[in-house]
Image (cartoon, grey):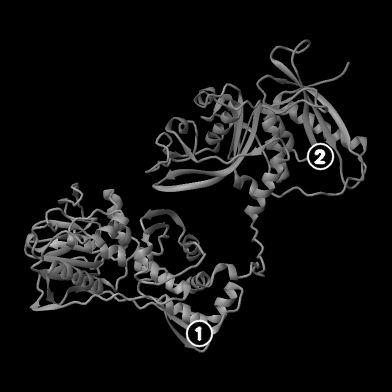
Amino acid sequence: MKVSINWLKEYVDFDLGEKPLEELFSEMGFPVEEIIEFGDDQVFDLEITPNRPDCLSHYGIAREMAAFLDLNLKEPEFPLKEENKDAEFDVKIEDQELCPKYVARILEDVEVKDSPEWLKNKLKKMGVQSKNSVVDFSNYILFAFGHPTHVFDMDKLQGGLRIRKGKGEKILCLDEELREVTQDDLIIADLRAPVAIAGIIGGEESSVTFSTRKVLIESAYFNPQSIRKTSKRLGISTEASYRFERGADPEVPERIADVLASLISKYSGAKVLRGRIMKGELKEKREISTSREFIEKSLGANLEQEFFKNKLSKIGCKVEKEGKILRIKPPSWRRDLEIPEDIVEEIARLKGYGVFPSILPSIAQPQGLTTPIRDFRWSLRNLLSSLWYMEAMTYVFVSDEKDKFSGGEGNPLRLMNPLNKKEPLLRRSLILTLLDSVSLNLRMGNKGAALFELGKVYWEENGESREEEKLALIETGILLDKGWSREEPLLASFYSLKGTIEWLYSYFGVSLKFREGLHPLFEDGYALNFGNGWMGLVKRELLDIYRIDEEVFAAEIPIKALLNGKVASFRDFLKFPSVKRDVSLLFSLSTKYSEIERKISSLGIPILHSFFLVDLYRGKGIAHNKKSLTFSFVFRTEEKTLKSEEVEKALEDIVRTLEREFGAIRRRND
């Protein structure tokens, strides 16, 4: 908003002494962007926030200065002499919501001529070129008082005016651009065609020229949202739309129409017909209830009793006191005053922020509520971070090419307006987006990557969108470099990832069984299913899309699979020793270890604490269709020291079961 200092002094007398004007404007809340010299005048370009449309004029800024500096505001007078002839014209508002109020005045015998020099100079400082004495005064009113008006050549209007929505018509605007208006746009039209786009720009065909003799003044209030949408759609911003879309004063159209009529009459010799043509009505009754105690507590300082009423009255508020309650009625031009906190902010601004002490409020900070899922997430993050994993947070968007590997549930969810047209889908697998992070790490020169992510996957099922939270793990290259405790680096492998999964499931007390399977993400023969989770070696075809040359191992686990487990807890060391026995058995090559593991576990032997595979041997002394598996069994109990007979009997039961179920043959040392 450009402000001429000489123009400003027409409404308020101020003398700041040594204090720079830009400092005053900044304290008022209007930072100075630029200062332009115009002979004996200065023009300040002020930054006005969108919530203060009342300050988009010289009178509005003067009103603020008067309140801020406790000065008197000058009220300019515009005498109006009406003819003994009624103003009559057919005006109808067809959309009351978009145009709540429309005021018109009619002037006859207008002598349109060149504007006086003082008016041309004022408009020049605002960056506006002079047109003629009628149009220039319409622009003068806008910069002086902030309410846009429009003037029509009345002889060019056919039959009356209709304030309505567009119907796909075209209008040649004052900037000589032909624009099409739709049902989303509010227009001013005569009974033939549009003559203006409401609140934005007038039409060329009804414009005032030097041959105009009869003028219709328009002064209205338009819906801010409607003006904003039309202005954006048409790609046009004018001084009028800039003010209307921020919220004009709904109670001044009558007064502004009179002021403009007075000026045109004075300088163009026009006759003003009696009365206004008024359609619609908009009167708001806003009231804010607060108290002095609330304001002082919010500001952290005590204020004088008279300060409230004096300062608030200066900005146009009416203040009534009922006991301890202050009932404040904001003026129609202060659209930003709606709640008690707005009054607090206004008092602080008018008093000056610097007078209030910088003291933090003494309030108790409530503790965040904890939930099982929140605790679980933190535990999971801490556990994985204690290994070699780092947490990643990735975008949820993927391409069609990548989604075909997801193996996710249902159908992919496609975005109507994606951020990236190449990635229009929401992911159905976290692994797809984690691979982007792996690719970036390798391109940046890292020798490997071990990442995890807690996030959601999305899909569509039976016409409804679904989502589920999952955990994804991914490994490639060197996990831990060699050092004083490691002669060789730790490399990512199928088994390192499998070990991480087993450790997690063990920690959260969830049973775990791996089964071979097929999954679109993983190479055939290198994919394991465990409940609702999957792990494996990522397909080379998919890695090529990400330009990854290394082998990548990944896993994805639904959070609910781990959430309902029982976290392992510490217990005392056993007082009684354990007994360990190793046994080697011959099995057919087709026998799977997972089947052997399940069978041993199903026996439910009380003293069997644990068992694991320690050796697989094929070679000399072993038939080509056989394999030798060596198991280590650990037996113990919390009640007593085990006897050799008890251990041998339990071990014999295990061996006999394996011989019977799998045709195993026990190998004995010769």
For label 2, the residue is: 609
Q: Position of residue 8 (x, y in %)?
A: 37, 66
For label 1, the residue is: 325
Q: Nearer the viewer, residue 234 or 267?
A: 267
> Judging from the image, what secondary structure is the residue with disc 1 in?
strand
Up-down relation of residue 86 to residue 407 (above or below): below
Q: Neighbour class for label 2 at 10 Å: few (<14), some, many (≥20)?
A: few
Q: Nearer the viewer, residue 192 or 271?
A: 271
- Give the spatial CA distance, label 1 vs label 2: 76 Å
Up-down relation of residue 626 to residue 401 (above or below): above
Q: Nearer the viewer, residue 614 or 653?
A: 614
| Residue under the point 26% across and 65% down | 141
Up-down relation of residue 419 to residue 103 (above or below): above
Q: Amino acid at mark 1?
A: Ile
Q: Is residue 516 visible?
A: no
The mark closer to the camera, 1 or 2, is 1
Left or right: where 124 falls relative to 495: left
| Residue under the point 74% across and 34% down | 600
Q: Which mark is residue 297?
A: none
Q: Position of residue 181 (x, y in %)?
A: 20, 52
> Judging from the image, what secondary structure is the residue with disc 2 in?
strand
The mark total stands at: 2
| Residue under the point 68% across and 42% down | 511
Quarter residue 113 falls in = bottom left
Q: Position of residue 16 (x, y in %)?
A: 48, 68
Q: Nearer the viewer, residue 327 or 413?
A: 327
Q: Amino acid at mark 2?
A: His
| Residue under the point 51% across and 40% down | 395
Q: Is residue 183 visible?
A: yes
Left or right: where 59 falls relative to 457: left
- Report the quarter where the N terminus lies: bottom left
